Amino acid sequence: MKNILMVLAISILSSGLTLGIYKYCIEVPVSPVRDVIIKDASFAKQVNHPNYYPDITNVSSFKDAADLVRPTVVHIHSSSGDRYDRLFGGESSGSGVIVSEEGYIVTNNHVISDAKQVNVTLNNKRTYEAQIIGTDKTTDLAVIKIKKRDLKNIKLPMLQFGNSDDVSVGEWVLAVGNPFNLTSTVTAGIVSAKGRNIDILDGAYDIESFIQTDAVVNPGNSGGALVDTDGNLVGINTAIITRSGRYEGYSFAVPSNLVKKVMQDLIEFGKVQRGFLGVTIKDISDEIADENDLKSMNGVYIQGVGEESAAEEAGLERGDVIVKVNGIDVKSSPELQEQVGLFRPGEKIAIIFLREGKLKSTEVMLKNGSNTVSLGEKRTDDGLLDSKENLLGNLGISAETLDDDEFKDTEGVIITKIDKDGIIEGTNMEREFIITAVNEEKVASLEEFITAIVDAEGEIVLDGFYKKYPGEYSYVFEKE
């Protein structure tokens, strides 16, 4: 399991200071520092308040918000599942937010990345096993779910989503999480900036448009809640800037509107359904403003338009400057990426843009990465195991009848592949597990295994062993 606590040294060339960015706020050993250069973040909305803290005489009670939120924030502990990995840093911990009574929990991808086993501890100190529903590296978000067998005995609290577009710079917010394993810790601060890109994600289509706050966030807060004073979720805490590996002034959260969209995609499809404009973009520089006679530095400059892209079909051209998406101002590339990232392929967005000094508008039907409007296949967990047709695919495995000279006297089925986010993957089973029984009934062949799964009801227990590990193992999943 990769070391997911990365300290990045960021050179602020204008000041001569070297700061660190504690890439992910969770408790694992610190890796060696590497140098990167932070992107120009001058576009972010800045705090402009003479007394630093705003007047709080009309702010709702922090206590009421804290009382509402604390029961919905969980402590997450994840591990690779391999005892050797656990000895060498294969474990991590962080926070998560319960967002439905069905047991769905939102957290950061880096909290559970590469995990084979995930446990969540509720505010009442009870611990339950969770399965990974889906992850998205481009936003550093993930969804996990408390296993159905445990939900029969508990009634979960859940946190309501707020509208992160309505959050204003200078507004009070609370951060709730589990720093340093100090469970249910609540801190308060103000929103310092929005649309902040701190360059911690390294993919081609990453979305970094963080809400920046001065609420105290420390290792273990990753995946925890950022809420307004009414107790509504406005962000998922993700990173801090630091030299020491601890809080030194600023923390960063993924906006709740983006969290909600990614969460819905992961639950419905197992992966994010991203809509794309099909353009290359730049923030407006002095040079671009002068060349195009722009009166404002706000907006996003279109540097190029892809052939047959959504943007081309909507009539957008190189040199256009996008200033609004669905009525929301976009003053920077991160803000544009955030707003477009809220929609799926095939959905339409309204864009207002500048062309030769004149405001124009167009409607764009977004496309996927393959330049079509189709979506991926939906998750259909219910009823998938009642038919022999494609049963292995529905389980998320490849398997075959055991035929091994080393085990001539053993009958069973060997797992040759486990698909990510499949039913079996959620049990933390590893490849090359040899199944000898289903619900204590022996299975001698792949056909017998398939028949046993189809005939079973409720909880299914798979018994067997590994070539590489001593002893017997059992894995359990629920047949819907």
Image (cartoon, rainbow, N blue to C red):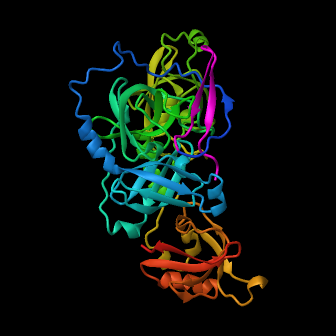
Name the residue nearer the viewer: 100 or 227. 227
Residue range (magenta): 1-26
Residue 178 vs 103, above or below: the answer is above
Residue 382 lies left or right of residue 308; in this view the side is left
Nearer the observer, 116 or 382: 116
Quadrant placement of the C terminus: bottom left
In this view, which residue lies farthest toward the bottom? 409
Q: Assess whether residue 7 is covered by the magenta stretch.
A: yes
Is residue 159 something that shows in the picture? no
> Left or right: where does residue 401 sit relative to residue 453?
right
| x and y, in percent, of residue 391 in the image | 55, 75
Can you give x and y, in whole percent of width and height, for residue 470 in the image? 66, 75
Above or below 370: residue 78: below
Percent x, y for residue 285?
A: 58, 15
Q: Is residue 249 visible?
A: yes
Image coordinates of residue 2 in percent, x first then y, are 64, 49
Residue at image point 73% right, 85% down? 407
Front one among 403 and 332: 403
Judge left or right: residue 405 versus residue 199.
right
Say which quarter of the image contains residue 103: bottom left
The extreme left residue here reads 58
